[in-house]
Amino acid sequence: AFPDFRIRGEGSNLQGTRWIHLGNDETYLALSEASEAPAEAWVPYGGKPGLNHLGFEVQDVEALRVRLQAAGYRDSTVPNVHPHRRRVYFYDAEGNDWEFVEYHSDDPAERNDYEQPDLP
C-alpha cells in the first residue's frame, strides 16, 4: 500500500523502549514497543499499548508553545536540542499527547537525522 515507505530510523530511548520510524522523506509512522514497566508520572499512556502521540509540522514552534500555554494546555516537552529541528509536546484535556516540530532545514537527510541525538 505504501511502496516508498522504508525504515527511516530505529533505536531505543533512555528507558530502553525500542522504537522505529517507517515512512518516506515527507510522511512517517513512529512505532514504539509497549513497556511492562510502570508508567512514569508524566506519561499518561506509559506502559500501555495504543496511541502514543500525534505529530505535526509547524512554522513557529515557540509562538505555538506560548499560545498553547496561554490557553491552559499542559506542556509535556522533554528537553531536546537538534541542529535541524525543534520539538514541543502538549497534553490536551483527555491526556492525548501532541507533538509539534519546526524544521530548520529543507534537506530531508538533515530533517530526519537520527544519528545526532536530541540532547537536553
Image (tube, rainbow, N blue to C red):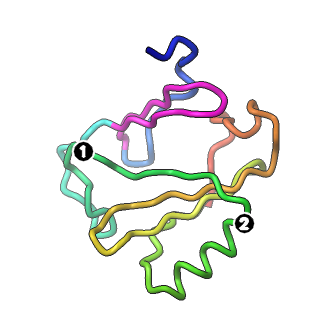
Pick the residue in front: 40 or 58: 58
Callout 2: SS: loop
Element under label 1? loop
Query: Residue at the location (49% across, 17% down)?
Result: 2
The correct choice, above or below, for 89 with respect to 65 in the image is above
What residue occupies the far top of the structure in this picture?
A: 3
Quarter location, residue 36? top left
x and y, in percent, of residue 117 in the image? 63, 44
**Amino acid beneath label 2:** Asp
Please say whether residue 24 is one of the residues in the magenta stretch: yes
Give the mark nearer the N terminus: 1 vs 2.
Answer: 1
Label 1 sits on residue: 50
Horizontally, is 72 left or right of 88 in the view? left
The numbered mark at residue 60 is 2
Looking at the image, residue 28 sits to the left or right of residue 113; the answer is: left
Magenta stretch, residue numbers: 16-32
Q: Amino acid at mark 1?
A: Gly
Q: Is residue 69 left or right of residue 26?
A: left
- The answer to which quarter of the image holds residue 62 is bottom right
Crowding at label 2, few (<14), some or many (≥20) Cα neighbours within 10 Å?
Answer: few
